Image (tube, rainbow, N blue to C red):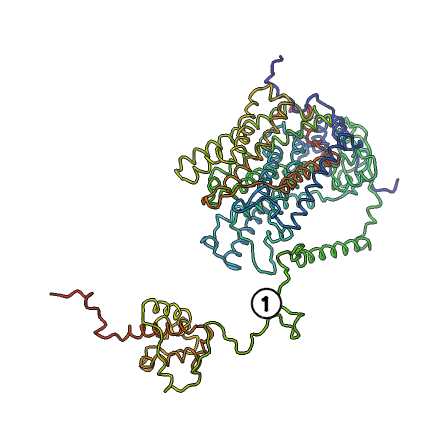
């Protein structure tokens, strides 16, 4: 047992690697032929994507009657998956923007990857509202443009706010990600060995020259974008929660929803990023850059957000009782003891109970345990959205209209497709672009910055 | 090689401390058109190079405020002037509900504007044909070295002096980089460039046209929309006349609309037609409803010809004149059925029964303005003792 020296920060990058060796490490996967494991994984994810696409095609052909949605459960897997995937995306922005503004250096190694996951997750999320309209080819009308009918969209509807929030979130995340990539693409350009790599990296790096006169503006732009991404990411899940909170369905109509949803989003997103990073650092030998300390810090964030989510569950129950509202009270008792109680208790155990194991340092630093708990958290957070949407809708005000919701094979296939899409994109990403921000990591290695010679 | 124009003289350094000191010395020596190239941003370089602080923040402020103003004004214009709709009983200008979209548009326009200005105006990117590209110098600073270069644009530029200066600073691999000749050959009116522009214009315009005018109206699957049935007003291939709707057989009478038997009959006959309906409260209320719907637009709610079309239309006669009051019911029925002067026939719109109910109600209206003493319900009057 070594004692910790508190006079020195623990270096975010272990072992003080030379700058050129960082280039070597990060660009290695881009120059090798794909290995066997990658090929197997890619086959699996593309199969998931293809099978799901067939189900989606059939949905377009026959209509969403193929799904389990019914009256009164008008929102089923489609919206559950949407909220789940948007939530996954939130971790990336939190890591790349909020932790950047808070000067949390441990984010350096994982920021690029987390941002990429944000983009892929938002793509998966965007799919569901687009297809849940039933006739996805008419989705152009979701945007206000001077159309031939002279009708505008309803600007005071939370559903429209959602359209704006998600599309803004996607665009800004993409810009933020790309801006971060430019210097790395320039480095790869200067290391390129084949003609095509050289040309494509030249085009996408836009001619970056690592000039200090550019770095000056670049760093400013990075801070500004981080400053905008921070309220943006909070606003996105807030607006998603408005889809529910602005309605009058018991169990939805509460003011706790925005903070509760944002905490839940960060919670599930961190679990997903942690899960995938465990594989990436192992597969590409990036243990020195994506360190165990970093993973531990992610687990600490998960205890915090998981506890906030648990607290929110308790508050919901308390508010339902304290409100004296019969419908509200019924809804919550029905959640815990009704026909969907299995989903509710899955959610509670995965989200509230298991993550508490992270209070133990050994579990927090054990790759196996953190992976299993991360998977639990993702399952639990998916069920949270299922519980919120399905239990509230299936038993609303009028007992005569109650109806159980059972997903069909098409619902499951489309859910599988979204996972297929996400992991296919992730697998393509790790082979085509640097999974770690080369320039940022170089800047955070010990000794990378000039020593302040007595000046302060 | 001798004729080529010098672009810059470069030197490489190994550590961030060295490059910071070198930057300070270069700026201190009075050079202005020099640059530092580092694989990552080195802290304190701005100060060492004596650069002005970045003005990018003001660009962001401009785009952010423009986006916010545009979103708020646009939504207000749509909701108040262009297509006002009452939604959920809210006022047209429900500004709190406009806040989320205003926020999103602010962020979007600020982010796009900032990055657009940064890349296009401040960096002058894309520029993949810069003299520094593909040099040994660029490859080194891209990886792990720290480079310093003073360009020939500097007023103090002198190749040999600068090389000496760099040596004094401890720079390694001091090199001269020349401008490439190819650069001068790029012409705006090159046919390839023009063709590319034309192609881009055609593709963009075509795509936009297709999306907005075709794609949005395309229906891939039309199970509900297209059914094997005759649609009213549509063309028919089945009938010779091309109409899909058929005319009824001659002499067909619609239910409740038997033709009027006394069309064109003289007043002396008409006055003997009597109201078949009893004078009850229900009938009168029904008559009031029909009167308010069909008669009041011209005659006014109380038959005083003070309707909402007052002064916009030939003034209809009051129903309280002696003439109408003294008409037998049959006469009024005749006017409703056949019309009179400007008034059209209401035979097709008001059923027979309703016409008679209206007449009862008209009688009530007339009585209300010409009440007799005997109409007073004495049991309701409080007598003074």
Q: Report the residue at 67% width, 30% height from top.
A: A276
The quarter of the rendered structure image containing the C terminus of chain B is bottom left
Q: Which residue is mark 1?
A: B232
* Residue B265: percent from left, percent from top: 42, 86
Residue B55, can we see it?
no
Say how many tags the image has.
1
Q: Position of residue A261 (x, y in %)?
A: 53, 37
Relative horizontal placement of residue B124, taking residue B2 as reference (left or right) = left
Give the image location of residue B71, x and y in percent.
55, 51
Q: Residue at x 49, y 57 (%)?
A: B85
Rendering coords of residue B154 (x, y %) = 75, 39
Residue, far left = B385
* Quadrant in the picture for residue B236: bottom right
Residue sitting farthest toward the top: A1
Q: Quadrant of residue B221?
A: bottom right
B170 or A230, nearer to the observer: A230
Question: Going 45% across and 44% down the picture, which residue do you hit?
Answer: A397
| Left or right of A444, for residue A404 | left
| Image quadrant containing the N terminus of chain B | top right
A224 relative position to B322: left or right: right
The vertical placement of B45 against A402, above or below, is above
The local crowd at label 1, few if under 14, some if 14 to 19, many if 20 or more residues have their Cα within 10 Å, is few
Tell me the element at label 1.
Answer: loop
Camera-side residue of A158 and B359: B359
Q: Residue furthest right?
A: B1
A50 or B127: nearer the viewer? A50
Q: Nearer the viewer, residue A7 or A22?
A: A22
From where the camera sits, is residue B50 visible?
A: yes
Please state the chain letter of the residue tagged with numbered disc 1 in the rendered image: B
């Amino acid at each position: 047992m070594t004692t910790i020296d508190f006079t020195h920060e623990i270096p975010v990058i272990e072992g003080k690697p030379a700058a050129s060796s960082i280039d070597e490490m990060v660009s290695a996967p881009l120059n090798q032929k794909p290995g066997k494991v990658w090929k197997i994984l890619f086959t699996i994810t593309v199969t998931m994507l293809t099978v799901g696409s067939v189900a989606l095609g059939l949905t377009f052909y026959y209509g969403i009657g193929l799904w389990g949605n019914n009256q009164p459960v008008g929102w089923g897997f489609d919206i559950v998956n949407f909220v789940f995937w948007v939530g996954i995306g939130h971790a990336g922005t939190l890591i790349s923007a909020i932790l950047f503004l808070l000067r949390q250096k441990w984010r350096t190694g994982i920021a690029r990857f987390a941002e990429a996951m944000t983009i892929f997750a938002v793509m998966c999320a965007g799919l569901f509202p687009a297809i849940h309209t039933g006739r996805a080819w008419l989705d152009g009308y979701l945007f206000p443009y001077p159309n031939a009918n002279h009708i505008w969209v309803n600007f005071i509807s939370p559903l429209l706010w959602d359209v704006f929030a998600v599309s803004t979130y996607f665009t800004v995340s993409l810009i933020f990600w790309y801006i971060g990539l430019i210097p790395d693409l320039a480095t790869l350009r200067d290391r390129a060995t084949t003609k095509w790599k050289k040309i494509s990296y030249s085009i996408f790096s836009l001619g970056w020259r690592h000039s200090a006169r550019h770095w000056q503006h670049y760093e400013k732009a990075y801070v500004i974008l981080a400053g905008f991404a921070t309220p943006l990411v909070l606003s996105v899940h807030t607006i998603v929660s408005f889809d529910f909170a602005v309605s009058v369905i018991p169990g939805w109509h509460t003011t706790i929803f925005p903070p509760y949803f944002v905490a839940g989003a960060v919670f599930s997103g961190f679990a997903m990023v942690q899960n995938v990073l465990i594989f990436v650092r192992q597969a590409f030998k990036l243990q020195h850059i994506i360190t165990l300390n970093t993973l531990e810090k992610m687990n600490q964030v998960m205890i915090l957000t998981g506890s906030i989510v648990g607290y929110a569950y308790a508050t919901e129950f308390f508010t339902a009782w304290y409100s004296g509202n019969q419908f509200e009270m019924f809804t919550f008792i029905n959640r815990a003891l009704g026909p969907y109680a299995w989903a509710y208790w899955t959610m509670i155990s995965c989200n509230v109970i298991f993550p508490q194991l992270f209070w133990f340092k050994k579990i927090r630093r054990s790759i196996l345990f953190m992976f299993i708990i991360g998977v639990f958290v993702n399952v639990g957070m998916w069920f949270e959205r299922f519980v919120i949407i399905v239990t509230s809708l299936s038993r609303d005000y009028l007992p005569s209209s109650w109806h159980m919701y059972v997903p069909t094979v098409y619902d499951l296939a489309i859910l599988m497709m979204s996972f297929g899409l996400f992991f296919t994109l992730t697998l393509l990403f790790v082979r085509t672009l640097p999974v770690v921000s080369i320039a940022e990591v170089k800047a955070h290695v010990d000794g990378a910055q000039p020593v302040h010679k007595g000046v302060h | 090689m001798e004729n080529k124009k010098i672009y810059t003289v470069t030197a490489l350094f190994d550590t961030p401390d060295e490059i910071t000191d070198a930057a300070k010395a270069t700026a201190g020596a009075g050079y202005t058109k020099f640059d530092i190239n580092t694989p990552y941003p080195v802290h304190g370089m701005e100060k060492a190079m004596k650069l002005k602080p970045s003005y990018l923040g003001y660009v962001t402020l401009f785009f952010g405020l423009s986006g916010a103003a545009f979103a708020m004004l646009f939504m207000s214009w749509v909701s108040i002037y262009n297509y006002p709709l009452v939604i959920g009983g809210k006022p047209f200008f429900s500004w709190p509900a406009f806040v989320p979209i205003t926020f999103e548009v602010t962020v979007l326009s600020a982010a796009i504007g900032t990055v657009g200005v940064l890349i296009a105006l401040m960096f002058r990117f894309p520029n993949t044909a810069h003299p520094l590209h593909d040099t040994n110098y660029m490859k080194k600073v891209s990886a792990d070295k720290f480079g310093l270069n003073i360009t020939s644009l500097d007023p103090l530029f002198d190749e040999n002096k600068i090389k000496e200066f760099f040596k004094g600073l401890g720079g390694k691999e001091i090199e001269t980089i020349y401008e490439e000749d190819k650069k001068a050959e790029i012409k705006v009116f090159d046919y390839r460039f023009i063709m590319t522009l034309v192609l881009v214009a055609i593709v963009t315009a075509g795509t936009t046209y297709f999306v907005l005018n075709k794609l949005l109206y395309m229906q891939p699957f039309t199970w509900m929309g297209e059914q094997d049935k005759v649609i009213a007003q549509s063309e028919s291939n089945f009938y010779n006349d091309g109409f899909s709707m058929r005319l009824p057989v001659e002499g067909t009478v619609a239910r409740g609309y038997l033709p009027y038997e006394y069309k064109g009959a003289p007043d002396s006959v008409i006055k003997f037609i009597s109201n078949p309906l009893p004078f009850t409260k229900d009938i009168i209320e029904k008559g009031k409803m029909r009167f308010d719907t069909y008669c009041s637009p011209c005659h006014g709610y109380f038959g005083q010809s003070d309707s909402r079309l007052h002064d916009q239309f030939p003034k209809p006669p009051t129903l309280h004149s002696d003439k109408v009051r003294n008409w037998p019911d049959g006469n009024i029925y005749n006017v409703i059925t056949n019309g009179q002067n400007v008034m059209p026939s209401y035979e097709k719109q008001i059923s027979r029964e309703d016409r008679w109910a209206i007449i009862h109600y008209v009688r009530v209206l007339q009585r209300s303005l010409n009440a007799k003493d005997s109409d007073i319900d004495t049991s309701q009057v409080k007598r003074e003792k």
